[in-house]
Image (cartoon, rainbow, N blue to C red):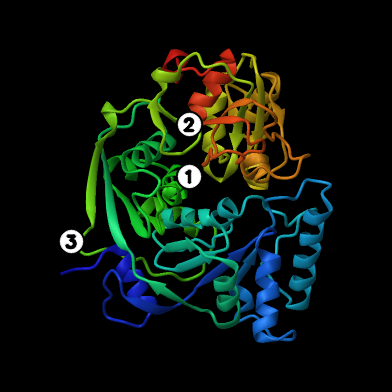
């Protein structure tokens, strides 16, 4: 019996011919990523266990990207940055991207892709549950806790249980009113927030390979919302072109065997799918947008590692161009690169940034913004009993701020269409 893509990558990094679901193995780690929320406690554990003067296992393989609570006056958040800065200086870390400098990048998951750290066939761990985003590039990528990260920081290795693999095949031609966000919300709605617990979610099919890398990242990003250990898409030429444009570091693509055994398989015909939302207060509370059309909104939010990439803003701008929003609408680029490109990319001669500003949107700094709630001065944070529609990835009570708020998750197309009317709107009503 053959092995899945995830099994083969883990086997290679464990120095084995093969592994099977349930096996416990030591694997060599290619990249460890951390940020301002989990970086300081990870460093504390590393120093406690390995010694105050211990060196990290490999300066070139540790990436630190502050992004969560950075544009705030909160003293605790500022203290975290000071701790990261001191650690990076102590260890002469080449891949520390300090906020407030020209090196600052923005949301870690998008920055990992932009800076060429996502390389097919590799193993990447991060102290963030959405580290599974990187699996769009054909690598094993998952989130770990601070203690596990500290072990990697000191040894470059970690103990892993090999997950089973669930396969999701998307066939057909994607209609212009759908985006990857609709596809992954359909998956989560189908299997539930625990349906993929400690399993790989592998995405396949012609409709997946018709997607850009940015859209593929949306699929793998939300694997964790189904409880998944990792999300993954086998690499193709689109993958290689994206990676090679950003790094000349060596990598070896890996592919699953034709006779690999999967835990289960789900097949979707995208031509028959409709725009969907996740209603409060869970990502699996799926409904066709038609079910909630007309729901009054207080706020719209376009951003995060899920919905703050350049193509997310291009989609939203196509709807908003030449019009004005009727409800407070926050636009938060995922990275400084995205922010820069928003001021260069045009639609009919007008830049994306100008389209949003002209529509009356409020523009934020590249960061996680309000996706994780954050301190009270966080840009776009939900307050009181607000009803919000957002391109983010979670809508649990308090996720975007106030525990009394109600958050709907949707694609950038649906959020932009809703911003125009001040109520949840089917994007098919406004797309031309």
The answer for how far apart the CA atoms under marks 1 and 3 are is 27 Å
Mark before the other along the chain sequence, 2 or 3: 3
Q: Along the horizontal axis of the image, is 21 left or right of 157?
A: left
* Residue at the disc numbered 1: 214
Location of the N terminus by quadrant is: bottom left
Mark 1 vs 2, N-terminal side: 1
Tell me residue 17's x, y (percent).
27, 80
- For disc 2, the neighbor class at 10 Å (few under 14, some 14 to 19, many from 20) is many
The residue under the point 56% across, 66% down is 145
Q: Circle 3 is placed at which residue position?
A: 258
Q: Quadrant of the C terminus?
A: top left
Considering the numbered disc 3 on the image, is that residue within a helix, a strand or a loop? loop
**Left or right for 349, reference 430:** right
Q: CA distance from mark 1 to mark 2?
A: 13 Å
Instruction: Please tell me whether residue 14 is drawn above or below residue 319 in the rendered image.
Output: below
Please say if the residues under marks 1 and 3 sit with CB atoms less than 8 Å apart. Answer: no
Depth check, front residue: 260 or 319: 260
Tell me if residue 354 can be seen. Answer: yes
Which one is earlier in the sequence, the residue at label 1 or at label 3?
A: 1
């Amino acid at each position: 019996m053959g092995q899945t893509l995830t099994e083969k990558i883990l086997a290679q990094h464990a120095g084995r011919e093969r592994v099977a679901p349930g096996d416990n193995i030591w694997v060599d780690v290619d990249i460890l990523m951390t940020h301002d929320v989990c970086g300081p406690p990870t460093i504390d554990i590393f120093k406690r266990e390995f010694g105050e003067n211990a060196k990290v296992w490999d300066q070139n393989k540790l990436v630190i990207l502050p992004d969560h609570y950075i544009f705030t006056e909160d003293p605790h958040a500022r203290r975290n940055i000071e701790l990261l800065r001191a650690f990076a200086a102590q260890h002469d870390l080449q891949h520390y991207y300090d906020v407030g400098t020209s090196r600052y990048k923005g949301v870690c998951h998008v920055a990992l892709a932009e800076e060429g750290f996502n390389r097919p066939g590799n193993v990447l761990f991060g102290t963030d549950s959405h580290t599974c985003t990187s699996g769009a590039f054909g690598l094993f990528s998952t989130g770990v806790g601070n203690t596990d990260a500290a072990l990697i920081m000191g040894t470059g290795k970690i103990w892993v249980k090999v997950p089973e693999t669930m396969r999701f095949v998307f066939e057909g031609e994607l209609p212009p009113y759908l985006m990857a966000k609709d596809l992954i919300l359909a998956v989560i709605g189908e299997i539930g927030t625990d349906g993929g617990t400690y399993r790989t979610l592998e995405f396949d099919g012609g409709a997946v390979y018709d997607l850009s890398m940015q859209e593929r990242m949306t699929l793998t990003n939300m694997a964790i919302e189904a409880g998944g250990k990792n999300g993954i898409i086998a690499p193709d030429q689109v993958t290689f072109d994206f990676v090679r444009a950003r790094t000349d570091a060596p990598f070896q693509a890996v592919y699953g065997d034709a006779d690999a055994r999967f835990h289960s398989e789900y097949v979707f015909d995208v031509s028959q799918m409709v725009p969907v939302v996740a209603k409060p207060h869970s990502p699996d509370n799926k409904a066709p947008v038609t079910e909630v059309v007309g729901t009054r909104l207080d706020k719209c939010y376009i951003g995060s590692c899920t919905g703050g990439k350049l193509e997310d803003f291009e989609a939203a701008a196509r709807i908003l161009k030449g019009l004005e929003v009727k409800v407070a609408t926050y636009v938060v680029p995922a990275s400084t690169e995205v922010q820069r490109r928003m001021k260069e990319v045009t639609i009919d001669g007008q830049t994306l940034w100008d389209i949003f500003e002209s529509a009356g949107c409020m523009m934020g700094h590249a960061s996680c913004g309000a996706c994780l709630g954050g301190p009270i001065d966080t840009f776009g944070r939900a307050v009181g009993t607000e009803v919000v529609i957002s391109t983010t990835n979670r809508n649990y009570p308090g996720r975007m701020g106030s525990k009394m708020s109600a958050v709907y998750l949707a694609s950038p197309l649906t959020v932009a269409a809703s911003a125009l009317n001040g109520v949840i709107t089917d994007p098919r009503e406004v797309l031309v």
